Image (tube, grey):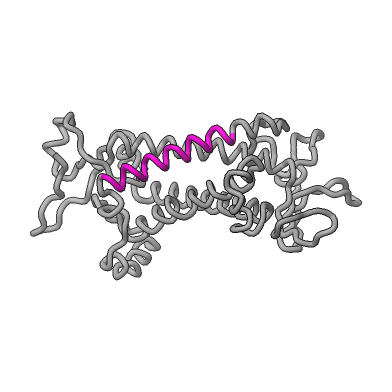
Amino acid sequence: MESVARGEASTGADSAASTDATLIYRQSRWTRLTHWLWAIALFFMLLSGLQIFNARPQLYIGKESGFGYNNTIFAIGAENTASGPRGYTEIFGKRFDTTGVLGWSGPAGQETSRAFPSWATIPSYYDLGTARVVHFFFAWVLTTTLLVWLVASLINGHLRRDLAPRLDDIRRLPRDIVEHARLRFHHKREYNTLQKMAYGGVLFVLLPLMIITGLAMSPSMDSVLPFLNDLLGGRQTARTIHFTVMLLLVAFFIIHILMILAAGPINELRSIITGWYRTDPPAHGDKAPERSA
């Protein structure tokens, strides 16, 4: 799997790899560790977060919510109809029947009113307390790992060297878009423009926004960071932003997996598991890719 950080070579490099000029040590142990820690943390945060959402399956814009307000923009629920209970999802007042998946789901004859189905939540049964414990634990795992990675990347120059888009990257953006659309991939040590923009967007926009909105929703943080709610437009708006960021991260994950499958899953998985990555053979007259020492 492609990682969000380019690794440095270790002194114990595989001797067999030294005979192959296209096989380079791309991902360090630290890179691989943080990648999988983030993946595990986000997985448990997603499923426990859906369980927490089930306790109040509506989203609002504003500082307050309730029967006296008309600021609901998203809702999942169930209603009785002439043909029996039906699940629905409502977005900006537009209602869609989502019976069997959202709003009303479960084994045949045992369906219940439930925003997200049991197979998509941790725990699978309704337990808000356990879901909150799981969610907050992995939230701290994610936050701590991200902060350590950020400091280390600033110190070793990884951010400037590998993730910051350069002028040439911007000029290559149209070509990168066309080549990705045609599923034409170039296996190089350096990230292409779309990768830099995607990884940068996740690392410096989505994940920090997820953390900030999570803190804003915590009543215990009001006394520590009282300005957060006002900055984000209120606790209900922060909750809506939090949910939206979750959807964007899920979309990123799906696209990420599709790109891995299209670019060559064996090579990508080997890179993020062992650190070794096979690049394209050098074109005639080009130098072989340099390998870290």
| Magenta residue check for 138 | yes
> In the rendered picture of this protein, how many numbered marks are placed on residues?
0
Measured as percent of width and height from the top left, residue 240 is found at 64, 54
Residue 2 visible: no
Residue at 55% in and 32% down:
137
Q: Main secondary structure of the magenta part?
A: helix
> In this picture, is 227 found above or below 167?
above
| 131 relative position to 202: left or right | right
Quadrant for residue 69, please give it.
bottom right
| 134 relative position to 278: left or right | right
Residue at 43% in and 35% down:
37
Residue at 36% in and 66% down:
178
Measured as percent of width and height from the top left, residue 50 is found at 65, 41
Quadrant where the image shows the N terminus = top left
Residue at 30% in and 40% down:
271
Q: For the view shown, which residue lies furthest in the left direction?
A: 285
Please state the extent of the stretch shown in magenta in the rendering.
135-155
Quadrant where the image shows the C terminus = top left
Residue 78 visible: yes
Q: For the view shown, which residue lies furthest in the right direction?
A: 82
| 181 relative position to 46: left or right | left
Measured as percent of width and height from the top left, residue 163 is found at 32, 54
Measured as percent of width and height from the top left, residue 160 is found at 28, 54
| Magenta residue check for 28 | no
